[in-house]
Amino acid sequence: MLPDKDGSGGCGGGQATSGEDPSVNLFREYLRLRTVHPEPDYDAALRFLDRIAEELGLPMKKIEVCPGRVVSIMTWQGTNPALKSILLNSHTDVVPVYQEHWKYDAFAAVKDAEGNIYARGTQDMKCVTIQYIQAIRRLKAEGRECMRTIHLMFVPDEEVGGHKGMETFVKLPEFQKLNIGFALDEGLANPGEAFTVFYGERNPWWITVHCPGSPGHGSRFVENTAAEKLRSIINSFLDFREKEKHRLNTSECFTLGDVTTVNMTMVKGGVAYNVIPAEMDVSFDLRIPPTVNLQVCFEEQIKKWCKEAGEGITYEFAQKHMNQNLTSTDDSDPWWKTFSTTCKAMNMTLEKEIFPAATDSRFIRAVGLPAIGFSPMNRTPILLHDHNEYLNEQVFLKGIQVYENLVPALANVPALPCDT
Ligand SMILES: CSCC[C@H](NC(C)=O)C(=O)O
Ligand SMILES: [Zn+2]
Ligand SMILES: [Zn+2]
């Protein structure tokens, strides 16, 4: 059987494919919206979400947190709205593609003979958005009610750091008013049988080190050059990188989230072959586990490396996330207990990890709220941000059932001390 190339099943572009599950059809429709950086079509996403809110019969609030950057929230009120609410968060933007490396058009949502749906956002995280929506649709259709209010939140700009999205929104009174007690946000696929859940994240530090030096003619042995300092800085950072890589590779119980990664990502400097430059800059992407003492140990280490490299070296941060809050995964925690026992009842095995990169969960945790990163995709290679990102339709459909159980379980957690 040939792949369903245009996703239309031969009934005209964008129309329902005959015999296809309506949830899969809705997922593919959402994947075709080009909410891709650097110019995401957020208006298309907002029109789509408006329609969904109307179908679900849920009120929709829109808050323009920055010009052209709208957070939208659908709310299903609980029978006891005084209790803390449940947040189901997802971002609407996706990262760009190298189309020439894709098997199919990355925004056509082609489904192949195995039921694999190919599109940017299949894993990150348009799947989760539609799974939340379809789970709520089914619960409402069954006439179910929950004690706690449930908010479905759709945020822009997660993929570019969240400054004009969640980072700003959590500081607004509109966020406070949502009265959130517990949040779910994105996780990662798991290639095995188990499902991965994230209870914390590494702190992203993006640093540029400026190395000034004496200029001069390229034919001479000039003292105190920028390049000599740059070499020392690069050696210090990359020697540390080797140590951390070794630590990861020699410890069976470590995952990427448990060690610090260092990557040299940009180098700048120089004007001509025969002019010794007056400054050279180097930038690094560091990801630091929440167990590391950031200020006392880590920044002091960087200062030491700069001092050792020579005179006049300075550095600046483009990202320096300092909050190290973790979400409890102790059985004494009622949110975690409910999350884990509900998954167990569905025969799901959970693997607890620190998220290696940065998601909007870090802003939710930073304001003191518990958040679990979870995208219910097992038996799936991790393909977020990669070429040929795909998700199998059966795995996607199973995820809806998972939320159909998980969401009411969380929204019916009895009153807690935090509720008063
Ligand atoms: C530090 S802001 C950038 C956010 C981005 N998130 C992901 C999931 O790729 C990252 O970790 O690089
Ligand atoms: Zn994401
Ligand atoms: Zn992403």
Image (tube, rainbow, N blue to C red):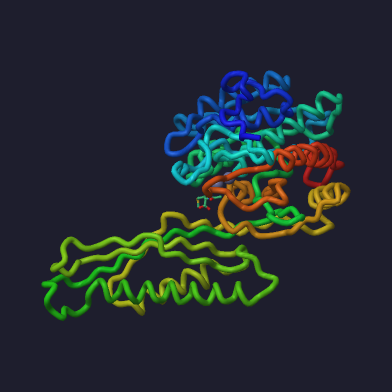
Is 40 left, or right, of 112 in this rendering?
left
Where in the figure is residue 148, as x and y percent of width and height?
80, 35
Q: What percent of the width, then of the height, locates residue 62? A: 58, 26
Q: Which of 165 and 414 is in front in this view?
A: 165
Query: Residue 306 falls in which quadrant of the image?
Result: bottom left
Residue 236 occupies quadrant: bottom left
Q: Report the number of numbered marks.
A: 0
Could you tell me if residue 78 is visible in this image? Answer: yes
Residue 368 lies left or right of residue 243; in this view the side is right
Q: Residue at x 76, y 30 (%)?
A: 136
Judging depth in this view, the residue of 101 and 33 nearest the camera is: 101
Compared to 44, does 371 lie above or below?
below
Residue 373 position (above or below residue 263): above
Picture quarter with the N terminus: top right
Residue under the image location 59 percent in, 64 percent down: 289
Residue 168 makes an appearance in the image? no
Task: Measuring from the top left, give residue 92's x and y in whole percent.
Answer: 57, 35
Q: Residue at x 57, y 69 (%)?
A: 293
- Looking at the picture, tell me which residue is in the foreground, 251 or 368: 251
Image: 7 above or below 213: above
State the residue at coordinates (61%, 59%).
324
Relative placement, left or right, of 367 versus 106 is: right
On the image, which quarter does residue 39 sit in? top left
Percent coordinates x, y for residue 34 in the rendering: 50, 32
**Quadrant in which the C terminus appears:** top right
